[in-house]
Image (cartoon, rainbow, N blue to C red):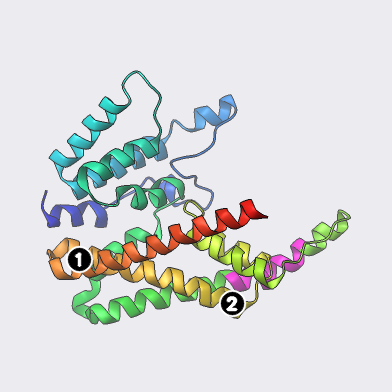
């Protein structure tokens, strides 16, 4: 499929009204009781899930997507498989980071920030220029970082602290090293909604300057990479796509390096 069709799938990516509710769930959700299992048979699972698959097929192309499905079925014939197995098969068939991209769409409720980042350059470049689009995207994410942190630390934490105290407990205090580790772990761990990451940092009473510097270093890198990549994808700009992919690969590499470092540190402790 052509770039215009990819853009159409993403920019017209409509969800049921259920997905716009504050208490909506992600496509992947835990179900332990009969009622919870029955609740999974809804528009989130089928309509949103189908739209996600359609988007992936449009992004990769019909033949590549079909080859990924074939490889997935062949590799797991007469055996169990996971969603990660399917995305890994698509990644191997297409040589594109499907597994990394899909983590946000599947594990987070609503439509993740990634969708806006991919389409922002294509939609607003004529009005703002690419530099303006990137600046606006970084400003929007920074405002989100600041507001959600402020709400958590100034509004929610005092109430939470009083509640815990009434129950006879005390909210644990993290030292400086643990506070830094917490923010980094939140930023490199997939599946945790963006605003929840910010709330956790605020509730943990992480100093604002440390929280903002670490968060901006991670979030700005991903946001810039996705905006540039989305614009290159829609307009066929090979050089820009290479720059964007390089930024994303660097960000992913740093993420994996820190995860390995933290795992070694945890085992040593």
Where is residue 40? Give x, y as percent: 47, 33
Q: In this view of the protein, can residue 149 be seen by the observer?
A: yes
Q: Is residue 264 magenta?
A: no
Q: Nearer the viewer, residue 85 or 19?
A: 85
Q: Residues within 10 Å of mark 1 (few under 14, many from 20)?
A: many
Residue occupying the point 47% across, 75% down:
142
Does residue 157 appear to the left or right of 192 in the view shown?
A: right
Residue occupying the point 69% across, 70% down:
205
Residue at the extreme top: 78
Which secondary structure, mark 2?
helix
Q: Main secondary structure of the magenta part?
A: helix
Q: Which residues are magenta?
A: 149-160
Which secondary structure, mark 1?
helix
Circle number at residue 210: 2
Circle number at residue 241: 1
Q: Residues within 10 Å of mark 2 (few under 14, many from 20)?
A: few
Q: Nearer the viewer, residue 6 or 99?
A: 99
Q: CA distance from mark 1 to mark 2?
A: 32 Å
The quadrant of the rendering that contains the C terminus is: bottom right
Give the mark, 1 or 2, whose residue is nearer the N terminus. 2
Residue at the extreme front: 268
Query: Would you place residue 211 above or below residue 61 in this image?
Result: below
Q: In this view of the protein, can residue 193 be seen by the observer?
A: no
Where is residue 220? Give x, y as percent: 40, 72
Where, by quadrant of the figure, is residue 41 drawn?
top left
């Amino acid at each position: 499929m052509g770039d215009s069709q990819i853009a159409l799938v993403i920019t017209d990516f409509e969800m049921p009204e259920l997905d716009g509710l504050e208490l909506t769930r992600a496509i992947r959700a835990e179900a332990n009781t009969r009622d919870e299992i029955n609740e999974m048979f809804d528009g989130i699972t089928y309509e949103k899930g189908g739209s996600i698959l359609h988007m992936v097929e449009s992004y990769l192309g019909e033949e590549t997507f079909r080859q990924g499905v074939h490889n997935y079925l062949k590799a797991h014939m007469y055996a169990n498989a996971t969603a990660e197995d399917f995305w890994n098969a698509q990644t191997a068939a297409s040589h594109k980071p499907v597994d990394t991209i899909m983590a946000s769409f599947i594990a987070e409720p609503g439509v993740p920030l990634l969708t806006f980042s991919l389409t922002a350059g294509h939609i607003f470049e004529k009005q703002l220029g690419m530099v303006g689009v990137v600046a606006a995207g970084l400003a929007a994410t920074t405002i989100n970082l600041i507001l959600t942190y402020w709400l958590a630390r100034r509004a929610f934490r005092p109430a939470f602290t009083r509640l815990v105290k009434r129950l006879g407990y005390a909210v644990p205090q993290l030292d400086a090293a643990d506070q830094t580790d917490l923010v980094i772990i939140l930023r490199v761990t997939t599946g945790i909604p963006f605003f929840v990451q910010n709330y956790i940092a605020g509730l943990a009473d992480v100093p604002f300057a440390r929280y903002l510097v670490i968060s901006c270093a991670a979030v700005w890198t991903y946001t810039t990479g996705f905006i540039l990549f989305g614009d290159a994808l829609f307009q066929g700009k090979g050089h820009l796509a290479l720059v964007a992919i390089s930024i994303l690969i660097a960000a992913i590499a740093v993420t994996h390096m820190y995860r390995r470092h933290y795992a070694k540190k945890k085992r040593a402790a």
